[in-house]
Image (tube, rainbow, N blue to C red):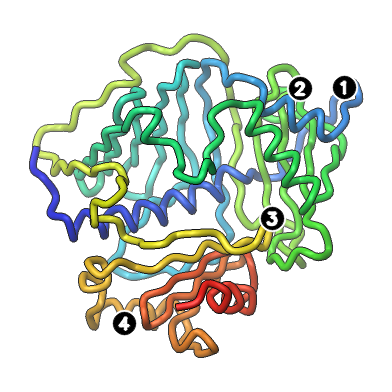
Amino acid sequence: MKPVNPRRRAAVIAVSGTALGAAGLGVLAVPAGAGEAPELPAVEPLALVESVLRSDAPALSGSITVDNELGLPKIDGMSAVTAESGRVYFDGEGRARLALELHGGEYTVVSDGTQVWSYDSEENIATRLSLPDHADMESPHGAVPSDPATMAKRLVEFAGKASTVSVDGTATVAGRAAYELVLTPKPTEKTLLREARIAVDAENRLPLRVSVFTHGTAEPVVSLGFTEIDFGGQAPDLFSFTPPAGAEVADIEPRARNRGEKPFDDAHVVGEGWDSVMVARVTADTRSELADARTHDLLSRIGTRVNGEYGEGYLVKTRAVTALLTDDGRIAVGAVPEKVLSDALSRSGR
């Protein structure tokens, strides 16, 4: 298995982070599909939120659909992990498999609890990420809760400060009776998003679908949900992976402190709630890897040249997310208008 040089590794991690961010938005969404509205006992909104985070995900397999109306720029000659449907498997003990159908093949992610494999069948490229132990996975600032109770408390605090939380009736999703949980930003939140709707299984509190809406739209801007789901034990071999013969294989090391191979320095969040902004600085290694004519050509095709108190840079906009990359190597990303990104960069300094 051949190693990846540090500068390429940094670029790969940066791209992987972007893909994970997009996946994160996807997991916050699902098509607002038709289905009977079953009669279910009344439930308080915050009690529903807490029950979701207290529950343990059971072993399952299911089919999912993805509806992406973000308005992401299409770049000729560049492949992306985008899909409209796929299969997901979970053993109830932390091992999982995701298979997404792409136009030219399949993209597979397999986790056995100690390492994560990803494989692009069209490119015949596999990557392996060895997971660090639990202590290394913890955020240095305690941002990653270590138990469901803590997660529930933080979400309730977030919802109380930044959102109106409600239960808007019921629905049938993938043949399952579900509550419709709705998170709506309070009027003071400067966000592009109008609301997030999450269909929660009435029996086991598993989120079955989520739909994210922006202002002025009747349909979700991005969505992900189950169309079919079966609960029960899964075959152990689903959670192991061996690269096909002839595949290019690369090892990606987990982010570690003081390694000098991170794509970003000083990554932090400015603000709270829906209009929070992630601000970071691209490392010197990554900047030298990306600072060429091809990068500027790409940015000019997907973004707009802008200037402000932060200096000059490129603004990249989708229907739900905005990103600002300055010429001096700073980046700000959030589900917010350009002005909020500019203010976040000013508050962070240079």
Kind of residue sitting beneath label 3: Gly
Q: Residues within 10 Å of mark 1 (few under 14, many from 20)?
A: few
Viewed as shown, does residue 120 lie left or right of 266?
Answer: left
Do labels 1 and 2 touch, CB within 8 Å? Answer: yes
Q: Residue furthest top?
A: 233
Judging depth in this view, the residue of 66 and 271 nearest the camera is 271
User: Nearer the N terminus, badge 4 or badge 2?
Assistant: 2
Dot in front, 2 or 3: 3
Identify which residue is drawn at 41% across, 62% down. 266
Q: CA distance from mark 1 to mark 3?
A: 31 Å
Q: Residue 26, position in %: x, y?
A: 55, 47
User: Nearer the N terminus, badge 1 or badge 4?
Assistant: 1
Judging depth in this view, the residue of 46 and 194 nearest the camera is 46
Do labels 2 and 3 touch, CB within 8 Å? Answer: no
Above or below for 91 versus 72: above
Q: Residue 20, position in %: x, y?
A: 44, 49
Query: Looking at the figure, which quarter contains the N terminus?
Result: top left
Q: Where does label 2 land, which residue?
A: 202
Judging depth in this view, the residue of 1 and 53 nearest the camera is 53
Q: Where does label 1 land, which residue?
A: 40
Kind of residue sitting beneath label 2: Ala
Q: Residue 128, position in %: x, y?
A: 24, 37
Q: CA distance from mark 1 to mark 2?
A: 8 Å
Q: Secondary structure at mark 4?
A: helix
Kind of residue sitting beneath label 4: Asp
Q: CA distance from mark 4 to mark 3?
A: 34 Å
